[in-house]
Amino acid sequence: MKKERKAGVLCHISSLPGKYGIGSLGKTAYAFARMLAKSGVRAWQILPPVQTGYGDSPYSSVSCYSGNPYFIDLELLAKDKLLEKKELEKVRANYRAGEVDYGALYEERYSTLRKAFSRFAFDSEKFRAFVKSGRAEDYALFMTAKTVFGGSFPDWEDGIKHRDADALEKLRTDYHEEYLFWQFLQYEFWTQWDALHEECKRLGVSLVGDLPLYVAYDSADVWAHPELFKLDKDLKLTKVAGVPPDYFSEDGQLWGNPVYDWKAHGSTHFKWWTERLTFALSCFDFVRIDHFRGIDRYYEVDAGEKTAKSGTWCDGPKEKLFERLGEDKSRIIAEDLGVIDDGVKTLLSKLGFPGMKVLLFAFNDDPENPFLPKNIKKNSVCYTGTHDNDTVKGYVDSLSAEEFYLLRSRVAMALAEQGISFRLKNAKKFPEAFIRLALRSEARLSVVPVQDLLGLGNEARMNFPGKQEGNWKFRLDKLPSHRAMARLHKMIKMYRR
């Protein structure tokens, strides 16, 4: 990460406002990028922009190389004469401002995109080159097989399940139009994405992406490379990922993702991982690796267990995973939250990756708390909160009177220690206090979730870890006001970012 101090805003594409039910890569995204640049914000962080599956989580995708078809901007398709005005109006009539309705999107959006595909000149030179590149090949075959056979890949007929070359060619030939449809979706997504990325570069706004450590079991990633995961001969799970029991959960957390066979990865010099990281770094200017501690040591549980109590800690690949990445390593951020032991600290030190400091974790009774503003070092990224936290206002509103007054005294002390003159009159003032502390910190990058920028409460929370439903729905009704952005701009200048 470059040494100048920068300010960033966290806002996922899905959370952008617009007319068609979910944020997109269209004109509102461009307007948001211009708004950031004008306000002195030099980094726009998003969550993984991948196609989501059951549960709508961007951390569980059908392919780590995919782009989310929901983010394809319909008006840009209309500009290319792939959709008609009356079709846009029909889609628009189905949605109102407010939360993302994934059920309604699933029912409508793919049928709309199929209409666009029916008018697409898929013999064009650019599209043919995209297909020939193989960039979306495993994804397109996987989604075609999903359409034809349904269910999960371990239950498909043997030829497709085990990727017999003749069976795959027959699938591609017999269902060629379906195969081309999924290629088309990725072509349109990445065409729009690349254009937005170029505009952000022109504006001087870096895109910060997010890379989940694990992939979903029922995904093109596992289907295409079963030898790299702990599966049996029938491609069923033998081990799954999770975390052991702790203060928050007496049973631990059973995530269910397949765990990597790191010995198999090592025998290929981590080719799959190097390609995955290289691809992510081509899409973003910086990449945050989620659950980074799993690269040092990870926790695995026998498949079929009901809880995570009886799991085992195993060694991960450590610094070997990044040996072939070269100078690109300087663009990686490590999500080092949770229970971090000396092994993770040593690995971070060897690699030089900046870790994360979250102010919502700072104000307990420990004066050595590494998240306290006075303890934050330069080689880190400071956040007021993350997508897994409540908003600052939501958190403050949840406190008892006694807890509130204790927090206020601790935050006031931190403000004084940092030389910040700011009065905490009431709960509404806390988001700005946290933003000031983040921007004033020594961290090279300070990131503010858009919810905290706007002082929103619990209703704007993005994710509730451990809760299966109701997540990832937050969406802005409109872009942040000029007043809100001017206030942020003033703070960015004040704290020399």
Image: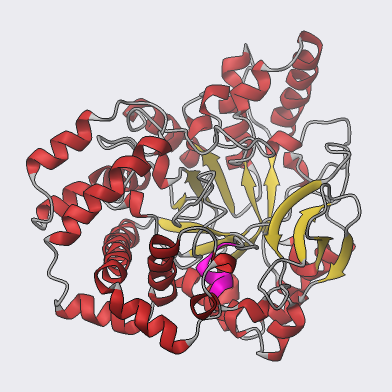
189 vs 309, left or right, is left
Q: Is residue 416 above or below residue 158?
A: above
398 vs 444, left or right, is right
In this view of the protein, which residue sits in the foreground, 359 or 379? 359
Instruction: Place residue 249 in its image quadrant.
Output: top right
Q: Is residue 9 above or below residue 160?
A: above
The residue at the far top in this view is: 401
Q: Identify the main secondary structure in magenta.
A: helix
Q: Is residue 377 visible?
A: no
Instruction: Check if residue 13 falls in the magenta segment.
Output: no
Name which residue lies at 89% across and 62% down: 312
In this view of the protein, which residue sits in the foreground, 338 or 466? 466
Instruction: Place residue 130 in its image quadrant.
Output: bottom left
Residue 223 coordinates in the image, percent (x, y): 55, 73
148 vs 406, left or right, is left
Residue 158 coordinates in the image, percent (x, y): 54, 77
Residue 416 coordinates in the image, percent (x, y): 72, 28
Instruction: Read off the magenta span.
Output: 218-223
Instruction: Check if residue 219 falls in the magenta segment.
Output: yes
Instruction: Place residue 323 in its image quadrant.
Output: bottom right
Q: Is residue 462 visible?
A: yes
Quarter of the image containing the N terminus?
bottom right
